[in-house]
Image (cartoon, grey):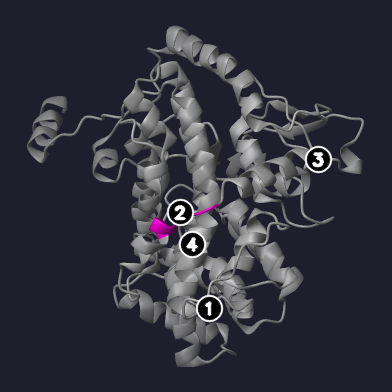
Amino acid sequence: MVFYRSVSLLSKLRNRAVQQPSLSNSVRWLQIQTSSDLDIRSHLKELIPEQQDRLKKIKSEYGKVELGKITVDMVLGGMRGMTGLLWETSLLDPDEGIRFRGLSIPECQQVLPAAKPGGEPLPEGLLWLLLTGKVPTKEQVDALSAELRSRANIPDHVYKAIDALPITAHPMTQFTTGVMALQVQSEFSKAYEKGIHKSKYWEPTFEDSLSLIAQLPAVAAYVYRRIYKNGEIVPADNSLDYGANFSHMLGFDSPGMLELMRLYVTIHSDHEGGNVSAHTGHLVASALSDPYLSFAAALNGLAGPLHGLANQEVLLWIKSVVDEVGEDVSKDQLKEYVWKTLNSGKVVPGFGHGVLRKTDPRYMCQREFALKHLHDDPLFQLVSKLYDVVPPILTELGKVKNPWPNVDAHSGVLLNYYGLTEARYYTVLFGVSRSIGICSQLIWDRALGLALERPKSVTMEWLENKCKTSV
């Protein structure tokens, strides 16, 4: 089934359907939605039976179809290239990059409602898109924004749990502690204890997921203000949208920063299901752990240096370049510093990706934002030079399948420009954003009745014996 997509009231899309190319070069149609229904739950309730029937048909008609071969390299190489997960909300193509429900990032920037004309898409709009497969109207986004605000109150015990940690604890440790403290309010946990029918699992999962998404900015902002601003808390502003209010609670109210946070949360929200945080969330939830437990586990995966912590490492590395060479660095000096980094056994953070084989579209949209808002910033100029210098060097090494910059290569410079200079905190921003994708898929996991994840593992001896008999 192809979802029919509604679009915001953009004049150029009125009165006509717009074709959108999918990864398979089929035609997708965007349609103007005139429904006055602003309740996202009711939309899901209509969609779920159709998608349940669709999944049953796939299983009955194609259950025995082979999707590829598994090699020893795949088993030893982090399962790269294996097709083994169902993830409805997004799909990552090695050449095109991420598509959210079939829409690329530039397409999302074009059709998702914004806070102002020509502005960046509102994260609430992407949440609606990921959950329903439909592009919402501005009215629907505003209604969802209001619902999230109504769910955003934080119990006092959450702050007390965070305060029990040393202030020197990593921001991600404090953030995850806050999420675990929120778990006591889980509607899914309570419903399961009372004996809810499995066909209804998605309903308390929906409640938990929306509440969790709503509460994360306040918890994340509390962690930031506790560590870096002497515990001086900035109250929420209920007149603001999700991304802007998050920026406000952090203490940043410039129009540029509000727009950046809307863009940041949107593009970091989802990146299909195989990355560490998304897979971890899905894996833990497959045991029927509630969204709080599942997302806390996902955050612990995100905190790893090879995943979400990389955005922290990028800015620190760029600043090390400035400290040693200066801001007005030539490309030849940059080349020398890159080689110095590589020859010391380290990587150049922000370059390469486990799936992508071209420049990350999330990098490109941040670059476009920088060209529009901070063209003359010295660190942005340095990042632009790195874009020219690093890929040829990594290609020369011959060990990297993708030498191009990823999403982490740019985000820190943008945040630094608007005053959020504390690089150790950056992964928390990533975590807030990723909740939108992980929780959206988690709701569909329960709606579709996806199974407990349990792949087979083997020993080296098993591999040796298997390979000897296969020769």
To which residue does mark 2 refer? 155
Which region shows up in magenta? 153-158
Amino acid type at image mark 3: Ser
Position of residue 56 in the picture relative to residue 367 (left or right): left
> Which circle, 2 or 3, is nearer the viewer?
2
Quadrant position of the C terminus in the picture: top left
**Counting residues from the N terminus, which is met first, the one under dot 1 or under dot 3?**
3
Q: Dot 3, crowdedness within 10 Å: few (<14), some or many (≥20)? A: many
Taking 96 as reference, is 54 above or below it?
above
**Counting residues from the N terminus, which is met first, the one under dot 2 or under dot 4?**
2
**Counting residues from the N terminus, which is met first, the one under dot 1 or under dot 4?**
4
Kind of element beneath mark 2: loop
Between 262 and 211, the residue placed more toward the observer is 211
Kind of element beneath mark 1: loop
To which residue does mark 4 refer? 220
Q: Residue at x 71, y 49 (%)?
A: 106
Q: Find the distance from the CA under tag 1 to the CA under tag 3.
A: 35 Å
Kind of element beneath mark 3: loop
Position of residue 382 in the picture relative to residue 343 (left or right): right
**Counting residues from the N terminus, which is met first, the one under dot 3 or under dot 4?**
3
The residue positioned farthest toward the front in the image shown: 156
Q: Which residue is drawn at 41% across and 42% down?
A: 185
To which residue does mark 1 refer? 421
Between 183 and 308, the residue placed more toward the observer is 183
Q: Find the distance from the CA under tag 2 to the CA under tag 1.
A: 29 Å
Quadrant position of the N terminus in the picture: top right
Q: Residue 8 carries which label?
A: 3
Q: Dot 4, crowdedness within 10 Å: few (<14), some or many (≥20)? A: many
